[in-house]
Image (spheres, grey):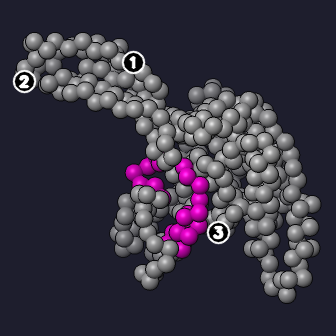
Amino acid sequence: IAYVNQVGGQDELVFDGDSMVMSANGVLLARASRFVEDLCVVDIDIANADLATERPFIDQTGIAETLTEEAEVWNALVLATRDFVIKNRFSDVVIGLSGGVDSALVAAIAADAVGPEHVHGVLMPSRYSSDHSISDAVALAENLGVEYRTIAIEPGHSALMEMLSSSYDGQSIGLAEENLQSRLRAVTLMGLSNAFGWLLLNTGNKSESSVGYSTLYGDSAGGYAVIKDVSKLLVYRLCRYRNELAGRELIPETVLVKPPSAELRPDQRDDQSLPPYEELDPILAMYVEGDHSVEEIIAAGHDPAVVQRIVGLVDLAEYKRRQSPPGPRVTSKAFGKDRRLPIVNRYRR
């Protein structure tokens, strides 16, 4: 049996190659490389082929090595990003560098995909940005060898707040102010995208998009969402994998050990709005990818109140996900074509 597969990315699909030839008695005779084009020549003794179950010695030099999960996902994301950029006739990409782990991962993937000379990072600090976030973003850009620039959003934020203040009529504007910052960053990035013809890469992960932890027309904006099907815990694993591959801290260790934060208000942390990702991601995997019911997830040992809340957030965030950029599918079930649910419904809990 000869199994032949193409190689390349198309929208959310990633074709990984991995062509192979099996003998009549189930022996793997040859296996081509994954995620790269490969030529595999196999000599088969047709005249003596029968249904015997003997398993002769096979020269393993014609069999490509098996990849770890991290290597498999990394190569898939790099291939998908490269093909999306090149096949859509872009040469360069632009990424907002926050000093956080998600933008660090996307920048590293982009550098591998199109070359660091074609990646442009933008630091957009506000009054809430910490010094370590700025220094981490700079260290990342320098480690990757990508061009970066700093555009402070404070002048634009102050102008917008002044422009809108008379229309708020005394309303509490905490969340509105937070989201203005995120949308200002999107406007800044899209301004550069339009001016230079760069493709804006979105940096949102699957855990956040699952529960709607993003700003519509803010950090959810972009032309391609590289890690939209990558959970937060896998984000960390991929960063460490890339560092191991480089043999050095390509992605600074300080990025990997600090608490995740959107930095849209003083002392903000993700775990103030969401359960720890060690608790959140397994619940999301069961509900989104496994199609398990609330009762089944609770029976697996998860806190009932947390499960009910997370499932409700996933259902409510469908309208946001419908407006998100395309991105590669690397799990058994991604949002979009794999999971088609209505925005308007009466079955919400």
Seen in the picture, residue 116 relative to 97 is either above or below; the reply is above
Under circle 3, the secondary element is loop
Left or right of 322? Residue 269 is: right
Q: Position of residue 104 (x, y in %)?
A: 68, 43
Q: Quadrant of residue 19?
A: top left
Of badges 1 and 3, nearer the viewer stands: 1
Q: Quadrant of residue 295?
A: bottom left
What is the C-alpha distance between the residues marked 1 and 3? 50 Å
Q: Residues within 10 Å of mark 1 (few under 14, many from 20)?
A: few
What is the C-alpha distance between the residues marked 2 and 1? 28 Å
The residue drawn where x is 75% and y is 74% is 175
Whichever of labels 2 and 3 marks the residue nearer the N terminus, that label is: 2
Residue on which the image places disc 2: 51
Observer able to see residue 73:
no
Under circle 1, the secondary element is loop
Residue on which the image places disc 3: 273
Observer able to see residue 311:
yes
Residue on which the image places disc 1: 39
Q: Quadrant of residue 262?
A: bottom right
Amino acid type, residue under disc 1 in the picture: Leu
The residue drawn where x is 30% and y is 26% is 20
Under circle 2, the secondary element is loop
What is the C-alpha distance between the residues marked 2 and 3? 61 Å
Disc 2 to disc 3: CB gap under 8 Å: no
Q: Which residues are magenta?
A: 314-335
